[in-house]
Amino acid sequence: MNIETEIKSILKTHQLDIGYANKLIAKNISVEINTGNLIAVIGVNGSGKSTLLKTLTGDLSPKKGEIYLQQKNITELNTAQLSHFISVVLTDTQFSHNLNVEELVALGRQPYTNWLGQLSKNDKLEINKALQLLEIEEKSLSKCSDLSDGQLQKVLLARAIAQNTPLIFLDEPTTHLDLYHKIFVFKLLKKLTRQTEKAIVFATHEINLALQLCDQIILVNKGEIIQKTPEELIKSNLLQELFPKDLVAFDASSKSFRVL
Ligand SMILES: Nc1ncnc2c1ncn2[C@@H]1O[C@H](COP(=O)(O)OP(=O)(O)OP(=O)(O)O)[C@@H](O)[C@H]1O
């Protein structure tokens, strides 16, 4: 294995408890995120997927335990330092739809620009690289308000790529997309992990697709958080127990859920 393809740990938790003031969502969480991995966070509605993502991105304080980003405790990093490690794409991200595509992607360079917000030659290069990687150069000057949901998702991803962090978090990136575009986004995320060595972690309800396309799955279930490969998860019987058994069942042979 050469140095370029060597797998490295980017994020690791230690005895992590997550939740809110009077509410424990899950405890003793032990997850690890490695370079070049595509990782889905799955679980039923209200199980705690967003809470986990918010905690891992430093948005919400852990109730207990530690999060290490490349061996540094996340509590020792200020917001500016954190923005060099982690970029976050939220489906309901608020931004002015008057911005054009290039201007929105340029926001990803904010952690690097000077106090005047001027883009350097290198910033412009990174923006163009992100637009090319997502194949949206021809939309550079289009208003974000004129884009479809699928196109906007690509632009938000390009902004995260331009931020040039080793780790990208997304909360439900395929909501509002049709099946074709859901698969398109999943495949695109996978391609990005392979081309850039970045790790991408995303919450999703598309369990069938996650089992087919992700390297790892983090399952949030009844206060427990478990990380496994899709194959391990399929063998574990945990998916059979995920939903009440009256409407839907997991079929291990086809590796998918089916309607009863
Ligand atoms: N700010 C908050 N304060 C207290 N409880 C909260 C807060 N935000 C969420 N919760 C609760 O935490 C639990 C987990 O919520 P979370 O949004 O993490 O679930 P989720 O798995 O992302 O759900 P969904 O799939 O529906 O988006 C829920 O019971 C929710 O009501």
Image (spheres, rainbow, N blue to C red):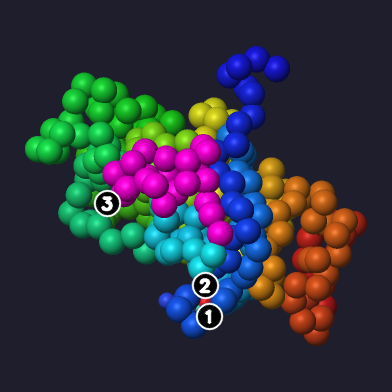
- Residue located at (39% from left, 34% from top): 164
Mark 1 close to ligand 1, CB under 8 Å: yes
The quarter of the image holding the C terminus is bottom right
Q: Quadrant of residue 258?
A: bottom right
Percent across and percent down for residue 5 are: 62, 22
Spot the residue most to the top. 2
Amino acid carrying label 1: it is Lys
Q: Are marks 3 and 1 in contact (CB under 8 Å)?
A: no
Amino acid carrying label 3: it is Cys
Reading the image, the residue beneath label 3 is: 144
- Residue located at (24% from left, 27% from top): 124
**Image check: 169 left or right of 111?**
right
Label 2 to label 1, Cα distance in Å?
6 Å
Q: Is residue 107 above or below residue 239?
A: above
As for residue 13 lying within the magenta part, the answer is no
As for residue 80 lying within the magenta part, the answer is yes
Secondary structure under the numbered disc 1 in the rendered image: strand
Reading the image, the residue beneath label 1 is: 23
Residues in magenta, as a range? 65-87
Amino acid carrying label 2: it is Gly
Q: Residues within 10 Å of mark 1 (few under 14, many from 20)?
A: few
Can residue 122 be seen by looking at this rendering? Answer: yes
- Residue located at (33% from left, 41% from top): 81
Reading the image, the residue beneath label 2 is: 19
Percent across and percent down for residue 183 are: 60, 50
Q: Are marks 2 and 3 in contact (CB under 8 Å)?
A: no
Can residue 192 be seen by looking at this rendering? Answer: no
Q: Is residue 102 above or below residue 250?
A: above
Q: Are marks 2 and 1 in contact (CB under 8 Å)?
A: yes
Mark 2 close to ligand 1, CB under 8 Å: yes
